[in-house]
């Protein structure tokens, strides 16, 4: 085991040589600007769900309209990108804010709509 003087270790940590949480998990959170460039005018989908009817594609129109497609239903609302999150207000005026991450392989992931922990892989088109 490598022994390091405590002051040297403290300097290394303060100087920023310690890995960040994102580097150790392999995910990096997208910034507000990155989210605007990625999502405005795009559709996200959940490619890992095998049954196409169970996927819930979401459209982010350039005018701020959000459409969530669920089976034979289209939920409409508004979206806003702020504080490194995409926040959707549905027709019942409920707001859901989620973060989008990118992994080391360039795959996108989004936090779940409900408050349970976890990420869902998404494709963006």
Image: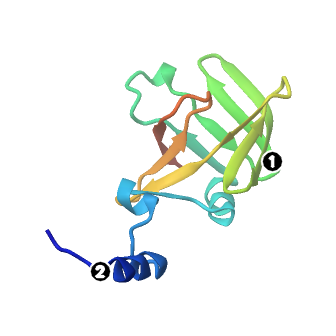
The foreground one among 12 and 98 is 12
The foreground one among 83 and 52 is 83
Mark number, residue 5: 2
| Residue at 81 percent of width and 47 percent of height | 64
| In-image side of 66 versus 103 (left or right) | right
Numbered marks: total: 2
| In-image side of 4 versus 74 (left or right) | left
| Residue at 38 percent of width and 53 percent of height | 25
Q: Is residue 68 above or below residue 119?
A: above
Mark 1, other Cα within 10 Å: few <14 / some 14–19 / many ≥20? some
| Coordinates of residue 42 in the picture (x, y in percent) | 63, 50
> What element does badge 2 sit on?
loop
Mark 2, other Cα within 10 Å: few <14 / some 14–19 / many ≥20? few
Q: Which residue is mark 1?
A: 64
Quadrant where the image shows the N terminus = bottom left
| Coordinates of residue 92 in the picture (x, y in percent) | 84, 23
């Amino acid at each position: 085991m490598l022994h390091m003087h405590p002051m040297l270790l403290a300097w290394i940590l303060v100087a920023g040589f310690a890995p960040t949480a994102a580097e150790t998990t392999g995910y990096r959170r997208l910034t507000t600007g990155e989210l605007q460039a990625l999502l405005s005018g795009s559709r996200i989908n959940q490619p890992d769900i095998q049954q196409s009817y169970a996927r819930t594609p979401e459209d982010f129109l350039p005018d701020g309209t959000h459409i969530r497609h669920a089976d034979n239903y289209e939920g409409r609302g508004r979206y806003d990108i702020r504080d490194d999150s995409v926040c959707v207000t549905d027709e019942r005026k409920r707001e859901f804010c989620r973060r989008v991450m990118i992994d080391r392989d360039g795959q996108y992931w989004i936090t779940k709509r409900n408050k349970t922990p976890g990420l869902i892989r998404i494709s963006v088109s």
